[in-house]
Amino acid sequence: MSEKIKIYSSSVAVTVEAFKNRSCSLPACHPNYVSPTPQDIKSLRHLIGFSQTDLGVLGNKSVSVKGCTAVRKWESATDSTEYRPMDYCLWRQMLYIAGISSINDDIEALRKYKNLNL
């Protein structure tokens, strides 16, 4: 009996250091910022040790004994009808929790890329 196993390669960061080098970890005002992929969201959630329910509670989303529908949708494939983009502010909170970014990084980026006097 032979069994076929699918092997997927991924460029998704799985360590704090790897996430620091990702475009999705940059502030939104940075010209190289890209939104996190569903796999980025799931990987960072695992990295910070959160369940889908934990992340839903942090994001003030509805949770049930089955988990959090909002988080499931953020982690769904982008070509799925269920997919929804994640709230940017919650993504930043996750980066702060992981120690990947800080509010000071965001303020400095605003100063640099938007010429604001903050």
Image (tube, rainbow, N blue to C red):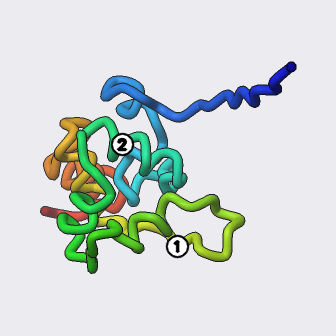
Where's the C terminus, which quadrant?
A: bottom left
For disc 1, the marked residue is 84
Say which amino acid is labelled 2: Leu
Where's the N terminus, which quadrant?
A: top right
What residue is at 25 percent from the left and 48 percent from the top? 50
What residue is at 52 percent from the left and 46 percent from the top? 39
Q: Earlier in the sequence, mark 2 or mark 1?
A: 2
Answer few, some or many: residues within 10 Å of disc 1's Cα (few below 14, many 20 plus, some between 14 and 19). some
- 51 or 104: nearer the viewer: 51
The disc label shown at residue 44, or none: 2
Quadrant assignment, res 92? bottom left
The disc label shown at residue 66, or none: none
Label 2 with label 1: CB-CB less than 8 Å:
no
Answer few, some or many: residues within 10 Å of disc 2's Cα (few below 14, many 20 plus, some between 14 and 19). many
Q: What SS does tag 1 mark? A: loop
Say which amino acid is labelled 1: Arg
